Amino acid sequence: MKRYLKLVNFEFNRIAKVYFVLLAIVLVSQFAGVIVESKSYLKEANHMIYEELMPKAEFFLQYGPMSLERVFASIWFFGPIALCIGVVAFYIFLIWYRDWFGKNTFIYRLLMLPTARLNVFLAKLTTILLMTLGFVAFQLILFPIESTILKWMVPKDFRMDMGTLEVIGSFRELQMIIPTSFIEFILYYGAGFAVVTLLFTAIMFERCYRIKGILLGIGYGFLAVVLFFTPILIQEFLQNHYLYPSELLLLEIVMGLIVTCCSIWTSSYLLKKKIRV
Amino acid sequence: MNKYWKLTVVFIVLILTIGAFYITSALSADQYPDFAIEKKSGNENEIDPVVIDGNYYAGSAINEGLTVTSKGSEYKNEQSFLERIDGIGAIESIRKLREEHRNFMRGKSGVPDNYYEDETYLAYGEVDYQVNMLAPEDFRFKISILNKSEGDSNSFEIEVPDSTAFDYMNVDDVQITDGKLMLVTKNMVEGNESVHVYGFDIEKGKMIDQSEIASIENLQENQSGQMIILNETDPMQAHQYVVFHKSILVDVEQPEGYYASEEVSGELVAYNLETGKTETVEVPERFQNLEQTIMFDDGTIYFVEESPKSVTISPYSLKNDTFGKEITFELQDSSGNEGSPEGLKAVAIKNGKVYAVTTILDAKQSAQVLVGSLKTGETLYKGVLKPTEQIVDVKDYSFYITDLQIK
């Protein structure tokens, strides 16, 4: 356990600088978004009401009140989130390949550590998970602050205040990142975890058998996906929806656990017996 | 300083924030307002069988389904996650069947027309077919019967006779009369719709007979025909008649240049399941209009007319072949906007009583609920559907009624 924690800490510190920079980018961009969008809304309001002499009520009817919704529809908000997603997706691969292609083949030292090699694998997995959930948590912290900034910028008559839950509820895209029920949260991120394990296993195949390994990795991935979807495929194929949705969901959770365990076991085996440096 | 500090900080912040978020999220689920039907006059017991499904909206973000009965309201999100995904989209009667006969209901549709239920039997019938490149083929009846008292079920599949040229087939009603299961279907053959009845022996699982009870023929070039089974509040219950609304439509060019269908003739075809006889009822001209609702319950056809202020019902008895007295019940939403397009009402008729409710309520208006006797024309119950406590913190809430069912 202690070895594992040490490895997690080590892996996390390796990316920490980039990670905190990313957090800073999210913060700056989203705050800037709130300010810019508020200003442009107020400018529009001023222009329409005082220059075009549009009655205030009609302005509201046409433009609606200012709220965080308006900010979230802008690139200021989704841009940095997309960046973070991209970086994590990229780092899923880099977290392994940097050890082989770095200045000195670092993987050599990692594999020589007096601990189960599975710990190296799990530590990298944990790091990816921590990064992802860290972004989610950070975004949850930012919402109320952004709401406060909006309150400073826009007079009360012109804005509609929203709580964090309402903010998320009003955006389908946000609900995919932060679902509003805890069960969905576990399901979404559990599925994400399973996918990352699968990718890691494919990487392990490639690292063991190189070119041939790519094919093996793809083959393994295909098998795992088919295995995972078997319950659904069987029902669709037979045109017989025998299982209730809740039963299907439970079955899929079991299949997901099986596939994930298989991936971890396969990776552990490859790391122990077949890995090439 | 602990050398793990970065990791520790990230981990603690993560757990606290996400934890706090989901705890508030779970707590706020109880914060939606409760709704109830409040009596204005009449007998409170009259609304016991009423089940109202609707959606509560607040702001742009909140949209929650809820069910209101005489006992109060229940939000969908108060159910467990698994209960909820099983119930998605299902109406009250199907939800109840799935709860009571979970195994029998496996793999069966959510359409009440496919079911029949009495004290002894729960029967299900549908038509399944294979969709191939060129046309659907291999039409089969899939029938399941549950004997509720003995607790055993029996399923069989039978090929639909003469179905090679079928374009489409749908089961519109399932009935059991004297141990004989009957499926009333709408068949589409080369663009012509017809209604058939197929009879089955429950014990042997065999088809006994079949007959055509109505069809659309001799259409002119710009005409089209349709046959629609009349809405029944509870299509699962035993009934002596099935009634189809057969109408001939003609495409009429509108001044704006597009075409719209207009009904040129309409008749109701009633088939007596016990005697196997068919009778037709001409639809009086004033009811010939596509928006007209015609309902059917217990041997009587009801022509329902809605106006912003009232609901008028003209009954036609199939037993006596006569029109009864027209009855008008006053029912007006409190906004009083005459002719507002939203001023629609949900109407249901069961056991000689009419149930009606205006479908929208919000801060300005509450939904009016009415139960009336179709035998005497009396109003048995009047009430309003409204929040149990004044909603103060949400200005723009609304509650849209999507479905009215009578248990």
Image (spheres, helix red, strand yellow):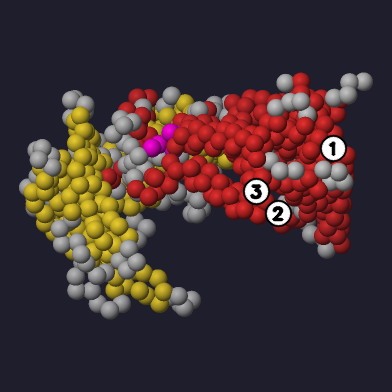
Residue at 56% over, 35% down: A262
Image: magenta residue range: A243-247
Image quadrant where one finds the C terminus of chain A: top right
Q: Give me the chain letter of mark 2.
A: A
Do badges 1 and 2 share one subunit? yes
Q: Nearer the viewer, residue A99 or B263?
A: A99
Q: Secondary structure at mark 3?
A: helix
The amino acid type found where label 1 is placed reads: Arg
Question: Which residue is labeled 3 in the image?
Answer: A209
Q: Position of residue A276 (x, y in %)?
A: 71, 43
Q: Give me the chain letter of mark 1.
A: A
Whole-number angstrom distance, CA of label 1 to CA of label 3: 27 Å
Q: Nearer the viewer, residue A212 or A174?
A: A212
Q: Give me the chain letter of mark 3.
A: A
Q: Nearer the viewer, residue B139 or B121?
A: B139
Q: Name the side, left or right, on which B66 lies relative to B199.
A: right
Q: Position of residue B339 (x, y in %)?
A: 48, 54
Q: Secondary structure at mark 1?
A: helix
Q: Secondary structure at mark 2?
A: helix
Question: Which residue is labeled 2 in the image?
Answer: A61
Image quadrant where one finds the N terminus of chain A: top right
The reply to whether the magenta stretch includes residue B207 is no
Do badges 3 and 2 share one subunit? yes
Q: Position of residue B341 (x, y in %)?
A: 50, 54
The disc label shown at residue A263, or none:
none
Question: Which residue is labeled 1 in the image?
Answer: A14
| Upstream in sequence: badge 1 or badge 2 | 1
| Upstream in sequence: badge 1 or badge 3 | 1
